[in-house]
Image: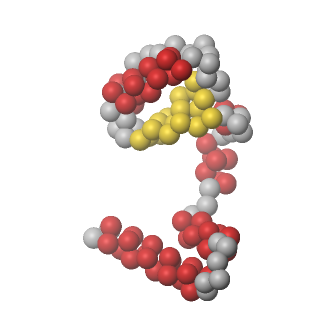
Amino acid sequence: MFHKVFYNNEYKVAEYDHLKDCFVKVIVQSRDNPLQFDMLIDKLEKAGIADLQVVDDHMHMDLQDDDDIIESAEDTMTILSKFCEQLDTTADKKRLDNLLRNLYNEAINIEST
Protein backbone atom coordinates (compact mmCIF):
# COMPACT_ATOMS: atom_id res chain seq x y z
CA MET A 1 0.00 0.00 0.00
CA PHE A 2 2.94 2.36 0.72
CA HIS A 3 5.74 2.64 -1.82
CA LYS A 4 8.88 4.69 -2.33
CA VAL A 5 10.22 5.58 -5.76
CA PHE A 6 13.81 6.82 -5.81
CA TYR A 7 14.52 9.35 -8.54
CA ASN A 8 17.95 10.45 -9.76
CA ASN A 9 19.57 11.59 -12.99
CA GLU A 10 19.80 8.04 -14.38
CA TYR A 11 16.17 7.19 -13.68
CA LYS A 12 14.25 5.41 -16.42
CA VAL A 13 10.50 6.06 -16.51
CA ALA A 14 8.59 2.79 -16.23
CA GLU A 15 4.97 1.67 -15.95
CA TYR A 16 3.29 2.15 -12.58
CA ASP A 17 -0.10 0.49 -12.99
CA HIS A 18 0.75 -1.77 -10.02
CA LEU A 19 0.67 1.34 -7.78
CA LYS A 20 -3.03 2.04 -8.38
CA ASP A 21 -4.70 3.20 -5.13
CA CYS A 22 -1.34 3.19 -3.30
CA PHE A 23 0.41 5.95 -1.37
CA VAL A 24 3.63 6.85 -3.17
CA LYS A 25 6.58 8.91 -1.96
CA VAL A 26 9.09 10.01 -4.60
CA ILE A 27 12.53 10.50 -3.03
CA VAL A 28 14.48 12.92 -5.24
CA GLN A 29 18.20 12.20 -4.97
CA SER A 30 19.12 14.49 -7.88
CA ARG A 31 17.02 16.31 -10.46
CA ASP A 32 18.95 17.65 -13.44
CA ASN A 33 16.38 16.76 -16.09
CA PRO A 34 13.05 18.49 -15.30
CA LEU A 35 11.31 16.99 -18.34
CA GLN A 36 12.16 13.44 -17.29
CA PHE A 37 11.00 14.17 -13.72
CA ASP A 38 7.70 15.59 -15.03
CA MET A 39 7.22 12.45 -17.12
CA LEU A 40 7.64 10.34 -13.98
CA ILE A 41 5.06 12.40 -12.08
CA ASP A 42 2.62 12.21 -15.03
CA LYS A 43 2.99 8.42 -15.21
CA LEU A 44 2.36 8.08 -11.48
CA GLU A 45 -0.75 10.26 -11.62
CA LYS A 46 -2.10 8.40 -14.65
CA ALA A 47 -1.62 5.10 -12.78
CA GLY A 48 -4.35 6.22 -10.35
CA ILE A 49 -2.32 6.44 -7.17
CA ALA A 50 -4.15 7.48 -4.00
CA ASP A 51 -1.58 10.05 -2.83
CA LEU A 52 1.75 11.40 -4.03
CA GLN A 53 4.45 13.10 -2.00
CA VAL A 54 7.70 14.40 -3.45
CA VAL A 55 10.60 14.71 -1.02
CA ASP A 56 14.08 16.03 -1.74
CA ASP A 57 16.61 13.65 -0.22
CA HIS A 58 18.34 16.12 2.09
CA MET A 59 18.42 13.67 4.98
CA HIS A 60 19.42 10.59 2.95
CA MET A 61 16.02 9.01 3.35
CA ASP A 62 17.21 6.14 1.19
CA LEU A 63 19.36 5.02 4.12
CA GLN A 64 16.50 5.14 6.64
CA ASP A 65 14.38 2.12 7.33
CA ASP A 66 10.60 2.64 7.30
CA ASP A 67 10.47 1.45 10.92
CA ASP A 68 12.92 4.21 11.94
CA ILE A 69 10.75 6.84 10.26
CA ILE A 70 7.61 5.51 11.95
CA GLU A 71 9.31 5.50 15.38
CA SER A 72 10.30 9.15 15.03
CA ALA A 73 6.75 10.18 14.04
CA GLU A 74 4.56 12.02 16.53
CA ASP A 75 0.86 11.60 17.14
CA THR A 76 -1.56 14.40 16.30
CA MET A 77 -2.10 15.48 19.91
CA THR A 78 1.65 15.91 20.46
CA ILE A 79 1.96 17.95 17.28
CA LEU A 80 -0.96 20.18 18.35
CA SER A 81 0.55 20.73 21.79
CA LYS A 82 3.97 21.61 20.37
CA PHE A 83 2.32 23.99 17.92
CA CYS A 84 0.54 25.81 20.74
CA GLU A 85 3.73 26.00 22.82
CA GLN A 86 5.67 27.58 19.95
CA LEU A 87 3.08 30.22 19.08
CA ASP A 88 4.19 33.81 19.56
CA THR A 89 0.99 35.13 21.10
CA THR A 90 -0.35 36.71 24.24
CA ALA A 91 -3.35 34.35 24.20
CA ASP A 92 -3.72 31.66 26.86
CA LYS A 93 -1.78 28.79 25.26
CA LYS A 94 -3.18 26.17 27.63
CA ARG A 95 -6.74 27.20 26.73
CA LEU A 96 -5.88 27.18 23.02
CA ASP A 97 -4.32 23.72 23.39
CA ASN A 98 -7.49 22.44 25.08
CA LEU A 99 -9.66 23.98 22.35
CA LEU A 100 -7.61 22.32 19.59
CA ARG A 101 -7.73 18.98 21.39
CA ASN A 102 -11.51 19.21 21.76
CA LEU A 103 -11.94 20.13 18.09
CA TYR A 104 -9.69 17.26 17.05
CA ASN A 105 -11.62 14.77 19.19
CA GLU A 106 -14.92 16.08 17.87
CA ALA A 107 -13.69 15.71 14.28
CA ILE A 108 -12.55 12.15 14.96
CA ASN A 109 -15.93 11.28 16.49
CA ILE A 110 -17.85 12.77 13.57
CA GLU A 111 -15.62 10.96 11.07
CA SER A 112 -16.20 7.58 12.72
CA THR A 113 -20.00 7.85 12.60
Q: In this view, does 107 lie above or below 36?
A: below
| Location of residue 3 with respect to 109 vertically, above or below | above
Residue 74 drawn above or below residue 2: below
- Residue closest to the eye, 46 or 64: 46
Where residue 72 sits: x, y (%)? 67, 54
Q: Can residue 65 be seen?
A: yes
Image side of residue 73 versus residue 15, left or right:
right
Give the total number of marks visible in the rendering: 0
Which color scheme is applied?
Answer: secondary structure
**Residue at (27%, 70%) from the top-left corner?**
113
Q: Residue at x 64, y 77 (%)?
A: 89
* Residue 82 x, y percent position in the rendering: 65, 69
Residue 25's x, y, as percent?
52, 36
Residue in the picture at 62% in, 69% down? 83
Image quadrant occupied by the N terminus: top left
Q: Is residue 52 above or below residue 80?
A: above
Residue 10 image position (x, y, % from top left): 60, 13
Residue sitting farthest toward the left? 113
Residue displayed at 65% across by 72% down: 87
Indicate the quadrant where residue 94 lies: bottom right
Image-quadrant location for residue 51? top left
Can I make out residue 78 in this image? no
Between residue 76 and residue 90, name the one nearer to us.
90
- Lateral position of residue 41 relative to residue 82, left or right: left
